Amino acid sequence: MIFSSELRARAFTLVGELRAKSLKLATAESCTGGLLAGLFTEIAGSSDVFERGFVTYSNDAKHELLGVSTALLETHGAVSQEVALAMAQGTLAHSRADLVIAVTGIAGPGGATETKPIGLVHVAIARKDGAVTHRVFEFGDIGRTEVRLATLDAAMTLLSEFV
């Protein structure tokens, strides 16, 4: 079993809500490396709602696959509100999804700076109808795996508020 029973239950509920609303979901992931897509596809029947996932770990991938501008990446850095929102918008533009979620952060143990510590994660959601939201999370230096799992939990919470 890859994911906890609690995370799977939350994904199961969200898949049902998306199905009931005839919404397609896509993901864009950096620090979680595809775990969010993996969580959704863990649910039998998720192909009804899960449209696709992008793992855009590098800046080049964010630019090439999602259209995030190199100027934005250079100015704000990959772990920023601006890039998370651009990833979400790029996912909408490069998929057939109605609803998208994008995550970018610093899982550690390296990569932190004075202004961007380990455990800093940005999550953005966008819908085709133009609605957008963003949240920043500061999980702290709790360990790489723990930051990634905390990001999944936060993403699920934000999605459930936004569906």
Image (cartoon, rainbow, N blue to C red):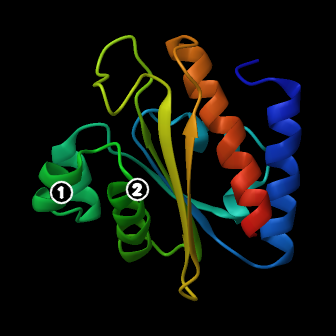
In the depicted structure, whether residue 112 falls above or below residue 10: above
In the picture, measured across the screen, residue 137 lies left or right of residue 7, that is left
Res 97 → quadrant: bottom right
Identify the secondary structure beneath mark 2. helix
Res 25 → quadrant: bottom right
Q: Which residue is mark 2?
A: 81
Residue placed furthest toward the front: 114
Quarter of the image that includes the C terminus: bottom right
> Is tag 2's residue or tag 1's residue first in the polypeptide sequence?
1
The one of 130 and 39 positioned closer to us in this rendering: 130
The one of 113 and 51 positioned closer to us in this rendering: 113
In the depicted structure, whether residue 65 falls above or below residue 115: below
Residue 32, can we see it? no
Quarter of the image that includes the N terminus: top right
Identify the secondary structure beneath mark 1. helix
Residue sitting at 76 percent across and 79 percent down?
Answer: 22
Q: Position of residue 114 (x, y in %)?
A: 30, 25
Q: Which residue is mark 1?
A: 64
Q: Position of residue 32 (x, y in %)?
A: 49, 33
Q: Amino acid at mark 1?
A: Glu
